[in-house]
Every structure is written in structure tokens, then in C-alpha cells.
Amino acid sequence: MKVFVSSTYDDLKSHRAVVEASLAKSGYEFNGMEHFTAEPRPPLDVCLEAVRRSDVFIGILGMKYGSCPPRKRLSYTEREYRLARGLKKPVFMFLIDEQNARIAPQYFEADPGKNERLERLKKGVLKQYNVARFTSEDNLAWQILASLRIAEVRARETSLI
């Protein structure tokens, strides 16, 4: 199963690395920006095509909204999420536990406009999905693997009925 992992990068780099390793060890194929190569296409086209080619979408939201394509207001992460929803892919969302996670000051969104967009995105996600909150890299990886495994078991049970 090909799993697309969407998040901001700099603030969640170590989280992404642990998630990638745990997915690989568990037999899942990680698909994310770390695997993109040089291409003659805009970055937005590359990441959206990667979402299309994936079986499952994992969205990880921390304390940053993320970068936006030139002259656009929606971040790459939000665009990836919206595409996965539009394609009716299985979407699993994970939000940082703002009360219990240790978050370095540089990983808080400084831009008020982006902070508003991040909060709006989080509120929308909370209305659409049962989310899991994470406190650390290992906690996030464990929750992702558990969610994928439960979804696989339920899908098998449904196909047997």
C-alpha cells in the first residue's frame, strides 16, 4: 500500500523520518517530498501527482501552516489534503498535541495570516475526521501504524460480509 505523507517539513523533519522508517519496516510504501526528484514541472504539480498515485493520505499538522506556491494563499499541505479528499482517498489526520508536545519556539507560526489559515484548516479537519493527537515522533509513528492496521482489518471484515 502506497502511503502519501503530507506535512510541513522543517518543523516536522524528525517526525517524518521516524514515520518513513516505521512505514517501511511495516511493509508500507512511503510516498512524500523526500522522494521527489528534479523535474521540469512546478513543485505543486509534482506533489499533487504524488497524492494521486497514493492509496492512502496521511496528514500531519503541527504549529506551522507551511509554504505556499508562488502567488497563492493555500499551502502545499492544504492543497494536498484537499486533493486527497476530492479524490475520496482514505484520509487519516494527525494533529500535534499543543498542550503536551514539546515544541521549540521557532516552530510556531510567526505570520499572523498563515496562523489564521492553519487554525481554520485544523478546525475544518476536526469537523471532518476523527483525528489523533501526537506528542512525539515515536508517538506519531505508532498512531499512524495503528490507524492503518485497523483500517486494513475493517476493510477485510467488510469484504467478507
Image (cartoon, rainbow, N blue to C red):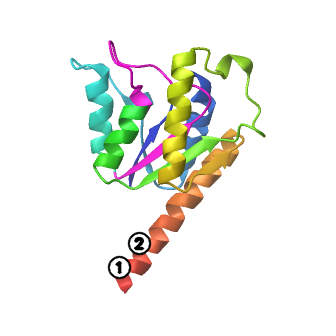
List x then y, in percent, for residue 113.
52, 18
The quarter holding residue 15 reads: top right
Q: Give the range drawn in magenta.
A: 55-77
Element class at badge 1: helix
Specify few, some or many for label 1: CA neighbours under 10 Å numbering under 14, 14-19, or 20 or more.
few
Q: In this view, does 15 lie above or below 39?
A: below
Residue hosting label 1: 159
Quadrant for the C terminus in the image: bottom left
Asked whether residue 128 is drawn in magenta, I would say no
Real-space CA distance between mark 2 and mark 1, rounded to the nearest whole angstrom: 6 Å
List x then y, in percent, for residue 139.
69, 47
Which residue, as the protein is rendered here, is positioned at the far left? Answer: 40
Q: Nearer the viewer, residue 25 or 101?
A: 101
List x then y, in percent, for residue 121.
49, 36
Quadrant for the N terminus in the image: bottom left
Residue hosting label 2: 155
Most frequent secondary structure within the magenta stretch? loop
Element class at badge 2: helix
Count of residue discs: 2
The quarter holding residue 61 reads: top right
Specify few, some or many for label 2: CA neighbours under 10 Å numbering under 14, 14-19, or 20 or more.
few
Q: Residue sitting at 57 percent across and 23 percent down?
A: 115
Q: In this view, does 87 lie to the left or right of 28?
A: left
Q: Is residue 132 above or below residue 31?
A: below
Q: Residue sitting at 40 percent across and 40 percent down?
A: 81
List x then y, in percent, for residue 6.
46, 37
